[in-house]
Amino acid sequence: MLVSDLMSTPVHAAKPNDTVSYARNQMLRHKISRILVIEDGRALGIITKKDIGFRLRRNNPQWRHRQIDNEPLIRVMSTDLVRLSPDSSIRDALLLLLAHQISGAPVIDQGMVLGILTRTDILRSKIVDKLDIPVTELMHEPVQVTPQHSHGHVVDLIKNGAEAVIVVDDGGAVGIITDTDLAFYEDHPDTAGSGTAAGIMRSSILSLPETARTREAVAVMLETACQSVIISGENGVKGIITRDDIIREVVQ
């Protein structure tokens, strides 16, 4: 199977002078994680939810007082694009995404953007549909913080590879934080929990029992547009399974 068989079209894109606010609204509207910045059919760069979340790091002096929503994309986008060929095998493409720790990349031929391949495209494919094993075989230990941990600490954890951070209080999971939560976080200094994990987290946690199978986890991810599912046991959180866990398994 080739990249051209699974890639998504059309590509959700923006112009270089469109603002970060425009990109964020597009991400929300279409439930996507990245926007390509295109001019005359050619990709100039890309901006992702992680890019936005990292730039909003609370203790980053360069951005602390700047209205990032009004910034043009050309000033904040990443120009170091990972590009996929439409004729590449899906396995090679997935290995490339995993190696660069990214969730999607544009498909480009002779300089022109043809589509985009994302982890969600893979989850919808027959490749993953064939996978049906216990979630306990793929889950891993979740990265955890307390409600009092700082916004900057959470950003650093996700920057270092955590797909999701579980917020734990008194031994139980009370929330979850992903790149989506970071990207759309609005700091209100006068609000309790401002600048901490408690102020960023979502209290609605998607979970499955430890008896569940990967097919069920994938169904939850696709239905809710989430990237991870908590696995629960009798004594609380047993682990977490993510899109990358699924993808690593299918490329073996």
Image (cartoon, grey):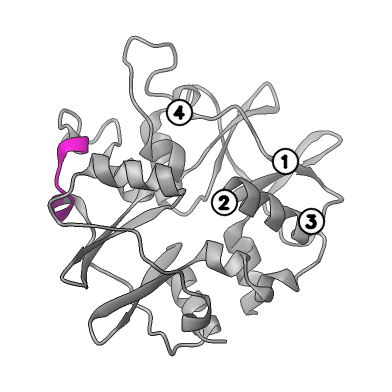
Residue 200's label in the rendered image is 4
Furthest toward the front, the residue is 10
Residue 182 at what x, y percent from top left?
Answer: 40, 38
Q: Say which element carries label 1.
A: strand
Asked whether 74 falls inside the magenta stretch, the response is yes
Q: Is residue 65 above or below residue 208?
A: above
- Give the Cα separation between the discs numbered 3 and 4: 28 Å
Q: Is residue 235 toward the left or the right of residue 4 in the image?
A: right
- Camera-nearest label, 2 or 4: 2
Q: Say which element carries label 4.
A: helix
Residue 136's label in the rendered image is 3
Residue 207's label in the rendered image is 1
**How would you rate the neighbour count of disc 3 (Cα within 10 Å): few for under 14, some for 14-19, many for 20 or more?**
some
Q: Indicate the quadrant where residue 155 lies.
A: top left
Q: Is residue 50 toward the left or the right of residue 251 in the image?
A: left
The residue depicted at 69 percent of the width and 57 percent of the height is 218
- Judge by depth and name the residue closer to the eye, 109 or 40: 40
Residue 200 at what x, y percent from top left?
Answer: 45, 28
Q: Which residues are the magenta region?
A: 69-75
- Camera-nearest label, 3 or 4: 4
* Residue picked out by circle 2: 227
| Disc 2 + disc 1, Cβ < 8 Å | no
- Judge by depth and name the residue closer to the eye, 113 or 160: 113
Mark yes or no: residue 158 visible: yes
